[in-house]
Image (spheres, rainbow, N blue to C red):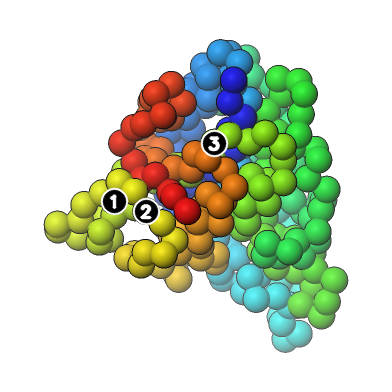
Amino acid sequence: MKKIVIKIGGGLITDKSTFKSPRLDIIQSVAKVIAELSADGHKFIVIHGAGSYGHLESKKWGLATGAEPERIDAQRKAVKSVRNDMLELNKLLVDAFTNYDIQTMTFPPSNWVEGIGLNFKGDLSKFNRKDNIIPISFGDVVDRKDTLEFGILSGDDLMVRISKEIPDVSHCIFLLGDTPGLMTKPPNEPGSELIKCWSSSEHVVGTHSSAQDVTGGIFLKTASAGEICQKIPVVWMLDGRKPERITELISTGQTIGTKIIP
C-alpha cells in the first residue's frame, strides 16, 4: 500500500479571483477519489491551498511581507480574519471527506508553526499516523519571532518538509486547477502543450498573478516538486479537475500529467 502526500491547489478548489468562492463540485470529486483509495488501504496526507479564502485578503493587507508600523492594527485584524477564513475553507474539505465516511484531523499551521519558508519550526510527527485518519493542513498566516511578527507559510513548503521527513512516503502529487500539468506555454495561450516529463534543470514557462497570489505560484510549485523528487520516487503534477487520474497513477504508475524527475 502507498503513502501519498497530496496538495489540493487553492486555484483548483476556489475561484482565486473572487473572494471566498469555493468550487464545491471539485472538492467533492477529489474527496471521493481519495476516499476510494483510502478504502483500498492507501494512506494519505492532505495539504490544501488558500485560493480566494487567503490570497486576496493577504495581498490587500501585505501579510506576506510582515508587519508595517503605519497599519499594524489593521494587519493584525486581517491576520485573524484570514486564519478564520482558512478554517472555513478547510471545513468544506473535511465535510466532503465525512460524506464518504473518511475521518480526518486538521492541523492549522497557525497553531503549531513558527516562521516561514522551508526552515519553519514545528513538529511534523503528527502527520505520521498509524491509524486510518487522514491528517490535513494548509497554507496559512503564521507567527514569526522577529520584528515582522507574521508571514505566509505556503502549502508548497509544507509539501517539501512533510514529503522528505515523514517515513515511507512513496508518492507526492500536486493537483492543479487550470491545466493538465506543466505546459510549454501558459495554458491559455495557443500552441501550449503538456510537458510529460520535467526536471528542475529545465526552465519553467508560466505566469504569476501577483494581484491574486501572495506565494510563488507555479514557480514555487515546480521548485518544491524538484526538491521533493530528490528523495521521493514518484512525484507528479496532475489536473485536479480530473481526479480519476490520481487513481490511474496509483494503480498503473502512469497517467496524463507531468512526471517530475531529478
Instruction: State the residue at coordinates (37%, 53%).
Output: 198
Looking at the image, is 104 positioned above or below residue 163?
above
Question: At label 3, which amino acid type do we have?
Answer: His
Looking at the image, is 147 positioned above or below residue 157?
below
Instruction: State the residue at coordinates (48%, 43%).
Output: 235
Viewer-side residue, 166 vs 102: 166
Local secondary structure at mark 3: strand
Instruction: State the residue at coordinates (85%, 71%).
Output: 145
**Which is nearer the N-term, disc 3 or disc 1?**
3
- Residue 162 in sight in this render: yes
Left or right: 257, with 58 as reference point: left
Q: In which quarter of the image is residue 140?
A: bottom right
Q: Which mark is residue 171?
A: 3
Mark 2 nearby-residue class (10 Å; few <14, some 14–19, many ≥20): some
Left or right: 167, with 177 as reference point: right
Q: In which quarter of the image is the N terminus?
A: top right
Q: Which mark is residue 198?
A: 2
